[in-house]
Image: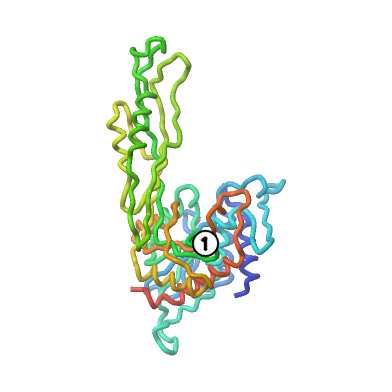
Amino acid sequence: MDERKLADLAADLVSVPSHEDETAAGDAVEDWLRHETDAAVTRDEHGNVLARRGDPTAPSVALVGHHDVVPPGEPQVDGEGNYVVEERDGRLYGRGSADMKGAVAASMLAFRDADLGDRTEPDGSGAPACELVLASFVGEEVGGVGARGAIADGFAPDYAVVAEGSTNYSKEGVTDVVVAHKGRRASTLLASGSNAHASTPDRGVNAVYRACDAVDVVRGLEFPEVEVMGECVRGSVAVTGIDGGSAWNVVPDECTVTVDERTVPGEYAPLDRTEEVPGVEWRVEQDLPPMACSDDAFADAVLAAARDAQGGDPEHVSKPHATDAGWLAGAGTACVVCGASEPGEAHTDTESVSLDVLSRCYRIYRNVAEGAGGFVG
């Protein structure tokens, strides 16, 4: 693989604005796949780009990414609204370089180049061991809109490598394999009371006091904890905002508390206990699912592919935040996460990705596809 071509493809994708409208970025992915591969390429009604090659009757192995991004920071756009893309010191800078158009580019090239011949035959003859799938979703940054739409339409690969960040998790200089990640549940506690003049507070019911009682319940909750393939995944719950009251001299009749919960596979914190406080209602605003890999052999095979692709010693690790792997795992796909982004890179005004690590990810993804005969059922 020509590393220059990978860097150029990544830069081309990063240069296309996709924080408000992913259409042009999706066009770029789709056009490249149609010109560079003989795969069956489709664009669904949600805007997702899907491509397939290999034996459609064989188990499917998907390389999964997304081409939407969060809004760019001021240094990441020029005076005409174009995305600024720079290459220096072996890194590619720009909105979406780490999260995650760089890994999408590595996935696209690996999808094109992977030899899908049946590795169980000495002469390499026979049907491909898998159907290889490339999926680039829309709307990951706003709750997995594209992934959810594709799943609702029947997208259900047997295995998936989601190319979100897993680099430098266990140690510096390696790209690890994530076998579990946390989800995120966003909740609102609505406390109600009754107004009164503040000079006679006993004539009212103070909603802020009720909200504070509910906060005390949250503060006392134990965080759920599970183990996935030897990895301890511990959740968390935090009150992140409180808003109530209309004037200095009025006992408030409403107060709102926001709660951020990081969930773990199979477990939630018992936030429903807050409703034991009189006048408090608990509402779930968003629930992004956690992920746990459901197939040990697949997780081990991806780790072996990662070891073969680099000089360091990668490990099975967990990840602190949600990805589209959570939606896919919930639909029955055996998932891992493996990609170039490092902790602290995504969503920053200085976002960048190592070009050497993108090349490493290309090798990992290709190794997984070409070694599918060792884990497909």
The single residue placed furthest to the front in the displayed view is: 171
Q: Which is nearer the eye, 217 or 30?
A: 217
Residue 348 location (% of width, % of height): 59, 49
**What residue is pinned by disc 1?**
167
The single residue placed furthest to the left in the displayed view is: 276
| Residue at 45%, 37% in the rendered image | 240
| 60 up-or-down from 49: above or below | below
| Residue at 27%, 31% in the rendered image | 276
Rendered-image quadrant of the C terminus: bottom left
| Residue at 36%, 20% in the rendered image | 206
Q: Element at badge 1?
A: loop
Q: Is residue 273 left or right of residue 245?
A: left
For label 1, count other residues whose C-alpha is less than 10 Å away and answer few (under 14), some (14-19) or many (20+): many
| Residue at 44%, 56% in the rendered image | 319
Q: Is residue 164 left or right of residue 253?
A: right
Residue 51 location (% of width, % of height): 48, 67
- Colouring used for the render: rainbow
Residue 136 seen anywhere in this rendered image of the structure: no
Q: Is residue 126 left or right of residue 22?
A: left
Residue 294 location (% of width, % of height): 33, 63
Rendered-image quadrant of the N terminus: bottom right
The single residue placed furthest to the bottom in the displayed view is: 123
Mark 1: which amino acid? Thr
Residue 138 location (% of width, % of height): 50, 54
Residue 262 seen anywhere in this rendered image of the structure: yes
The single residue placed furthest to the top in the displayed view is: 199
